[in-house]
Amino acid sequence: MKLEENIKYWEDAYLGNTTFISKHNKKSLPWDIGTYDDNLKLFLDKTKLKGNVLEVGCGLGYDVEFLRKKGFNVVGLDLSNEAINLAKRNVGKKNTELLVEDIYSYHTDKKFDLIYERGVSHNQQDTLHILYNKYHSLLKDNGYVLVITGNDNSKLSKYTQPTRIKLATIENACRDNFKIISAEETTFKTHNDYDDSLGWKIVLKKKEYHIYA
């Protein structure tokens, strides 16, 4: 999908112009769970991480606000101007920056301790290796990438679900720059107008290269 088409798709979704297949024929967004993702909380509880976070595809901003309250400095990116406008209602201004940006062209002098995304990788399968190369360039050497994504093993539902992706697709895309620290099946939660589905929770770290004289 070209960038212009991609922007239009997400803009239409957040403006309520897209109809998803739901239990009650409402225009609720499937990924809008109204709060932060539990997988993010569990990851932070385990790692005790601090510092700078980049959320790619921040949507309505619930995870940005959760991270902000945890003491992180957070940058949230989304292609949709409407999404960022809505997120600003949910996110405090202190230690946050919400930007209408395409991750592929995003530039900053900052380096991040964590790059977090929920539902981005499974929609970028044709350019996933380029996406992970970008993450590599933005991440601190000891930083983490946390990916929450759809799962090809999920049972099919008659309602809209996250795009399905194979773990091997992610492994192949990140192999040049990242090692997979963990890959676990988890619940990809959705709005209650839809069925929750199986997801992947994947943690990446930069590969270490040693040069011998």
Image (cartoon, helix red, strand yellow):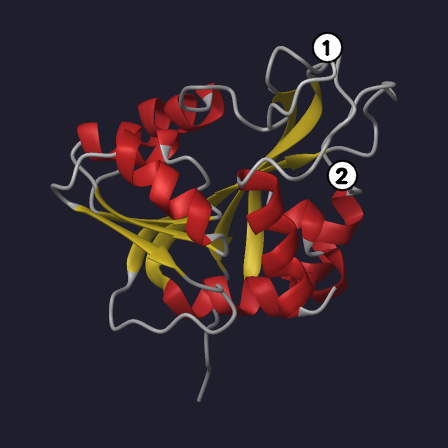
Question: Residue at the spot x=64%, y=37% of the render?
Answer: 149
Answer above or below: position of 176 versus 200. Answer: below
**Are there few (<14), some (14-19), or many (20+) residues within 10 Å of tag 1?**
few
- Name the secondary structure under disc 1: loop
Instruction: Determine contact: label 1, label 2, CB under 8 Å.
Output: no
| Relative depth, front residue between 16 and 182 | 16
**Are there few (<14), some (14-19), or many (20+) residues within 10 Å of tag 2?**
some
Q: Dot 2 corresponds to which residue?
A: 163
Q: Quadrant of the C terminus?
A: bottom left
Image coords of residue 207 (percent x, y):
50, 62
Q: Dot 1 corresponds to which residue?
A: 24
- Quadrant of residue 86 in the image? top left
Residue type at numbered disc 2: Thr
Residue 195 visible within the image: yes
- Precedes in sequence: disc 1 or disc 2: 1
Q: Nearer the viewer, mark 1 or mark 2?
A: 1
- Name the secondary structure under disc 2: loop
Question: Residue at the spot x=60%, y=28% of the render?
Answer: 29
- Quadrant of residue 45 in the image? top left
| Relative depth, front residue between 129 and 124 | 124
Question: Residue at the spot x=81%, y=24% of the render?
Answer: 154
